[in-house]
Image: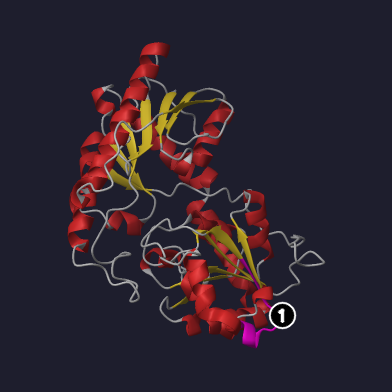
């Protein structure tokens, strides 16, 4: 089969699918992306495109996102058309993310080629990030801005033949008119590769010996250390945790920017803001900021953890949550709707109030003090991840069935 992927940050949600398809050595795979340099994947042809237009800094706020999306979409379409003319390429199907406009004009190049779009989130004034954090009240213009940015998914609905959304909570964020065109299936997690490791060790520069599962370690991970992912809640819980568990260490993975929501105005980012707020109430020698780490290191951090924290406002469920479950982590997570879809309190993890750092601290202290009493939660979390989110046995077959149904050229992908 000839498949064209489109995602500004290759490979995005297509990481495992792309690698699996490439390993079959039966398909022509082309990936359209803005990422520079793009990752090199054997068996995948990469086309880098540039946005045809970027809005000015003082662009009208209510149309800025749409302006960005059409610029990206037209740039992607031009690159795809140029490649098609040069190589004689016509895909059997197009797979891509709808959030940045890359799929908007694909039907104008290949009207008869089916498009399967990834729908991630429909922005709402209630029930999501907006207004959830009492420390950051939304501006009075928030409802107008949220509605305006949804011009992109609204236009994308007409640009695709079918859409996929990874969780029920995300699907429910979309209005009713979207639902007949959407199916719900997670991207999938390689539970066969993401396993517990009782013998794991990890070395840190300031320690004279590697940490092992015998050490009292708890962990936190986010792409960026930001409010949307509860970094400030973790930090405010640290003094209480450290006071009650004098040997506990926390390993923190994440950059110092902001992926979602408002960025901290502190010159040191939210990390600097929280360090200033907490001062000497925290023993910083037991706090290890690891920054952004290689994937293998991230795995070891989770595998070594006695207690892994997944703290988030109501927003898109992170891969890291399911990956940590797959690795058998004892999860302590925030009690919000997208998390409840993956973790039932007392069954596959423990849920706490996002707005109460003391509640978080008490739960972490209890798990650190009595790990054997909570070990069954990690076992149950892994079973749940395998049953509902396994890439090879659950998610990939569902996606392949949908792709094969859409493609009318006779080309098919064999089920794993």
Residue at the image position 45 percent from the left and 63 percent from the top: 342
Q: Residues within 10 Å of mark 1 (few under 14, many from 20)?
A: few
Rendered location of residue 371, percent (x, y): 66, 77
Nearest the viewer among 145 and 329 is 145
Nearest the viewer among 164 and 41 is 41
Rendered location of residue 106, percent (x, y): 29, 28
Above/below status of 181 relative to 259: above
Left or right of 288, for residue 315: left
Above/below status of 266 relative to 358: above
Q: Is residue 277 magenta?
A: no
Residue at the image position 25 percent from the left and 27 percent from the top: 107
Rendered location of residue 357, percent (x, y): 48, 81
Query: Magenta residues?
Result: 241-251
The image quadrant that residue 242 belongs to is: bottom right
Name the residue carrying label 1: 247
Q: Quadrant of the N terminus?
A: top left
Left or right of 403, for residue 388: right
Rendered location of residue 258, percent (x, y): 43, 58
Left or right of 225, for residue 313: left
Residue at the image position 27 percent from the left and 53 percent from the top: 122
Q: Residue furthest right?
A: 208
Above/below status of 9 relative to 324: above
Can residue 111 be seen here? The reply is no
Q: Secondary structure at mark 1?
A: loop
């Amino acid at each position: 089969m000839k498949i064209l992927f489109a995602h500004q940050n290759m490979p995005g949600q297509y990481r495992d699918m792309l690698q699996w398809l490439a390993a079959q050595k039966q398909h022509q795979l082309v990936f359209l992306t803005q990422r520079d340099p793009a990752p090199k994947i054997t068996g995948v042809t990469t086309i880098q495109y540039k946005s045809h237009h970027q809005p000015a800094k003082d662009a009208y706020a209510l149309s800025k996102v749409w302006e960005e999306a059409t610029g990206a979409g037209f740039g992607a379409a031009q690159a795809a058309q140029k490649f098609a003319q040069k190589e004689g390429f016509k895909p059997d199907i197009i797979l891509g993310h709808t959030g940045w406009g890359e799929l908007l004009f694909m039907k104008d190049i290949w009207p008869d080629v089916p498009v399967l779009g990834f729908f991630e989130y429909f922005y709402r004034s209630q029930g999501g990030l907006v207004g959830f954090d009492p420390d950051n009240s939304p501006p009075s213009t928030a409802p107008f801005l949220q509605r305006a940015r949804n011009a992109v998914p609204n236009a994308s609905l007409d640009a695709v033949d079918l859409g996929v959304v990874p969780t029920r909570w995300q699907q429910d964020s979309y209005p009713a008119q979207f639902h007949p065109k959407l199916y719900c299936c997670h991207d999938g997690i390689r539970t066969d590769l993401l396993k517990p490791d009782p013998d794991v060790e990890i070395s840190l520069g300031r320690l004279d010996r590697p940490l092992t599962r015998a050490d009292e370690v708890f962990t936190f991970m986010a792409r960026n250390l930001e409010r949307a992912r509860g970094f400030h809640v973790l930090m405010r819980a640290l003094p209480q945790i450290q006071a009650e568990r004098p040997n506990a260490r926390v390993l923190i993975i994440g950059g110092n920017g902001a992926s979602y929501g408002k960025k901290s105005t502190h010159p040191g980012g939210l990390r600097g803001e929280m360090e200033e707020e907490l001062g000497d109430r925290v023993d910083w020698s037991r706090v290890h900021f690891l920054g952004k780490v290689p994937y293998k290191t991230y795995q070891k951090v989770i595998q070594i953890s006695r207690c892994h924290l997944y703290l988030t406002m109501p927003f898109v469920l992170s891969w890291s949550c399911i990956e940590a479950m797959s690795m058998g982590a004892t999860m302590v997570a925030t009690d919000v709707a997208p998390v409840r879809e993956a973790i039932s309190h007392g069954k596959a993890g423990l849920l706490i109030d996002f707005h109460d750092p003391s509640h978080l601290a008490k739960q972490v202290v209890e798990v650190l003090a009595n790990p054997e009493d909570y070990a069954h939660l990690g076992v149950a979390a892994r079973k749940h991840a395998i049953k509902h989110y396994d890439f090879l046995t659950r998610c990939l077959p569902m996606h392949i069935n949908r792709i094969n149904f859409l493609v009318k050229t006779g080309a098919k992908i064999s089920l794993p």
